[in-house]
Image (cartoon, helix red, strand yellow):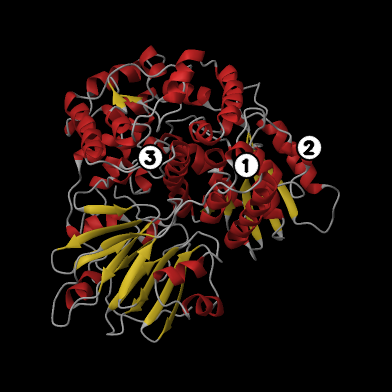
Amino acid sequence: MPGLLRDYFVVLPDSVAGHAVAGQLPVPDTTRVAGGVGDVVTLAHPSGRPWIVARPLVRQVSHLRRGDDALVLIGPDRIPEAVLAGLLEGARDRAGLERRLVRLPGLHHVIAYLAGETWIRGTASGLRRIYHARHAEAGTIASDRPAVLAHLTGAPLDDGALALRMLDFLPHPLSRRVLWRGVHETGAGYGLALPVAAPGTAAAPGSREYRWWEPPPPELSLAEGARRLGDAVAASVRAHVGGLDRISCELSGGLDSTTLTFAARATAPAELSLLTVAARDRYSEDETWARRAVAAAHGGHTDLPALAHHIIPADQAPYFYADLAATAAELNDEPLPVAPGRARAHLLLGRAHATGSRYHLTGYGGDELFLGLPHAYQDLFHGNPLTAWNHLSGLRHQLGWPLLPTLKALLNRSTFPRWLAGAVTTEPQPVTRTPLLSWGVRQSLRPWFTDHANALITEEFRAAAAGQAEPIDRWRGRHVDIDAVRMGARHFQAMEDIGMTIGLPVAAPFYDDRVLEATLAVRLADRISPWRYKPLLVEAMRGVVPDALLARTTKDHMSSDEHQGLREHAPELADLWTGSRLAERGLVDARHLLRLAAEPFSPVLVEHSISSTVAGETWLRTAENAWPTPDRTPTTTSEASR
């Protein structure tokens, strides 16, 4: 069953060969897309040949041309022509345009033609990414979807990149390893410049990357940073749902989803549907807090949007690993560890869609941004060692970190390449009391990985380290913080793709670049604390979210649903490992996995998560059958109406 390709765009060179490539673009099966497929938007080079071919399902394509210069923004909202003109006019180069783009929420792909070249970028958060590949005739072509480029260039799957995705966490820069050979990802915070082909030549020169984003210095006080964060969250929510009459929010009861519920209410939709999945764990507090949030949102006011709270009973919520075959409905850019929870997400989004919602908001990204990872205390220690040790002591006692190992980790000065070279090991998983103050999390190879897979994974890490890989930021804490946000943004793609299958756009406003920047701009000692829960978000939402709801300091987890899912869906897992595609490629021991399917409470599965391996297997089956026959898109070029 072929995978469903979500919306995509492709940027083509101004050449005869580039025009020919436009006729080879894949056409999704319209019968399998809820709501049908959006119109093809084709924007032309001055020559009349196709420059950008976009097939948006839920995103908006806003564009403006002034003489030879042009600007295209692809994102959740339609940008008025007057705003585009204000961005483009007077921008003599990339830097000038970037200075103007900070006026907008950071949610768009940006494509521009300035000073004789095309340049393309996604977002610093990694929510929107750019890929490129070298076509034999046309030269460099770019897209937001690596599968499209693989289709156009005939690129084969890369077993090394596939083996890496069987790990739970793929750190920078290995997260950029694309699953198809010859297809490359432009790093988040970097853009791609495509020079114009010389007259009389068939292909344009090679592309080059440039850096367009730097994290802001952490200089703001908590009060100033909270004001900036509050404005950024409100602007991001408006960009997604402003002006829509019926919207929905996932209201888990946690602080992140509660924040977005009240931010969404402020956009004044006619109807706001709130959805809560009840927990099976009788000690769960989420549903209680969700009900409190709904009661507070009503607040006795009659001039507010109509609120409807839908609680999905726990016994209707699928366990993890349910309906694994359904993952064939979405062709993600890569295997994502959240795939085993697809049935649960599909249920929630399906219920939201049934309310008539036109856009659904989630609190994804809140934990990565606002909890504060322990690694940040390494940064604080350099400038304010007493404060760092005071905070770290409080955290150490909460997590049970022994004193001497904590001191050793704090004083460790290993370089990023040295850490990366040893970031995977055959040793058991680190215990929960291991201090986490390095460049990331050290991971263990799974016992069901083959020697071939282990060799591929360790070689990938070794090669990246030997290549003197540069960290995202020279400070460990900022490096880990930004890497965690970008990892979460990748995982959120699975939710977006499920939503597109259903016909419901899904958004995570916390992955907006302006939200990320506002968070990173706050002084570390104010932004994270072992004695306060998400202090920056709490202060940013004062006056928007009632104080009683901001007082929550706990967070529920669903680990029991995952472990129970291994038992409930053991037959489906056994079917998955029978005829395993990963095993055919020599990456996993199918017999070992079959034994584990029959022993769902095995200590091996307690120590080692199997979710990434399941995600890799289901993704591979989809990717191998993505385009069984060559499809074609008409090559007519036109300026699509806005």
The kind of residue on which mark 1 rests is Asp
Disc 3 and disc 2: Cα gap in Å? Answer: 36 Å
Q: Residue at x 26, y 22 (%)?
A: 448
Q: Which mark is on residue 336?
A: 3
The kind of residue on which mark 3 rests is Leu
456 horizontally vs 435: left or right: left
520 horizontally vs 268: left or right: left
Q: Which mark is on residue 548?
A: 2
Q: Secondary structure at mark 3?
A: loop
* Residue furthest bottom in the image: 67
The earlier-in-sequence mark between 1 and 2 is 1
The earlier-in-sequence mark between 1 and 3 is 1
Q: Residue at x 20, y 76 (%)?
A: 197
Whether pointer 1 and pointer 2 mark residues with C-beta atoms closer than 8 Å, the reply is no
Disc 1 and disc 2: Cα gap in Å? Answer: 15 Å
- Depth check, mark 1 against mark 3: the one in front is 1
